[in-house]
Amino acid sequence: MTHPPSPYLVPGFYDRALAEGRHRDIVGGRWEETGRLQLSLLTAHGMQPRHRLLDIGAGSLRLGCKAVPYLDPGHYHATDASRALMLRGRAVELPDPDRLPEAHLIEDAAFAFPGLPPHVDYLIAFGLFTHLPPGDTALALERIAQRWPGPRVFLFTVFLAPEGQESASLRQPDGVVTHPDRPPWHLTEASLSAMATAAGLTLTRQPDRLPRGQVLFLA
């Protein structure tokens, strides 16, 4: 049986989910907990209201509904494979949608980053690379490094596999089972470091305990 590289790439996935009112469910659940956690990670790394934030793989704005009220108006930018999903989040989850211009929500499944500012201070990709094959993760790291060489703070999460065990499915500390060949994907820290080095990035593993056993990196 052939599995899609991401469940979000199944034809009609977003249309069905939005029609059923599941814009929260399809971004991984734990809506309030995870949104608060993402904002706390960013502020712990120094983000202030004056900074500009890019939320990569923003979904229905689980982070955005927390970050937009915190940041100065217009300082939140987001990308996702589905603009319709982000617009649904803007319409129903933001306490004041006018603080977020619709033009700041960019549909982008290929990490081309069209229409985004030349400088952002913070970038986050939370629970995104866990749904993408390693080749797409490597491409994203490369294009982020090229587009925003710095200074900036980039936080992202992955599932890790111990060296020598990456070819098998594994149960992560929080119970989720990850795989080498289908989502949710895992990879070794060495292979991730090699991707980052090829992109010109230096990674620092963070000690935070995250939902489902994800591991946080600072690039």
Image (tube, rainbow, N blue to C red):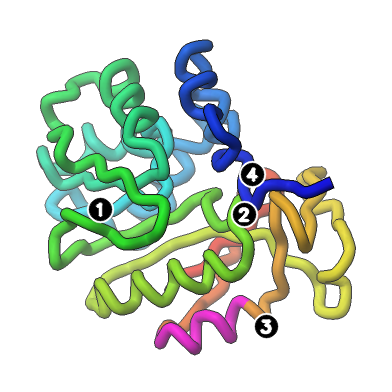
Alpha carbon of mark 1 to alpha carbon of mark 4: how far? 22 Å
Residue extending furthest toward the top: 20
Q: Nearer the viewer, mark 4 or mark 2?
A: 2
Residue contact between numbered discs 2 and 1, judged by CB atoms under 8 Å: no
Instruction: Label 2, secondary structure: give it.
Output: helix
Instruction: Label 3, secondary structure: give it.
Output: helix
Spot occupied by residue 129 in the image (x, y as percentages of width and height): 56, 57
Determine which quarter of the picture holds residue 99: top left
Alpha carbon of mark 2 to alpha carbon of mark 3: how far? 16 Å
Ranked by sequence position, the earlier of labels 4 and 2 is 2
Residue contact between numbered discs 2 and 3, judged by CB atoms under 8 Å: no
Q: Nearer the viewer, residue 207 or 92?
A: 92
Spot occupied by residue 131 in the image (x, y as percentages of width and height): 61, 51
Q: Nearer the viewer, mark 4 or mark 3?
A: 3
Q: Residue at x 37, y 34 (%)?
A: 61
Return the residue at label 1: 53
Ranked by sequence position, the earlier of labels 4 and 3 is 3
Alpha carbon of mark 4 to alpha carbon of mark 3: how far? 22 Å
Return the residue at label 2: 130
Return the residue at label 4: 211
The numbered dot on residue 190 is: 3
Could you tell me the amino acid type at mark 1? Leu
Spot occupied by residue 23 in the image (x, y as percentages of width and height): 47, 23
Other-residue count near label 3 (Cα within 10 Å), few / some / many at <14 / 14–19 / ≥20? few
Spot occupied by residue 217 in the image (x, y as percentages of width and height): 52, 67
Ranked by sequence position, the earlier of labels 2 and 1 is 1
Residue 60 is left or right of residue 122, and the answer is right
Q: Residue at x 44, y 67 (%)?
A: 140
Magenta part of the chain = 192-200
193 in magenta: yes
- Residue 26 drawn above or below residue 48: above
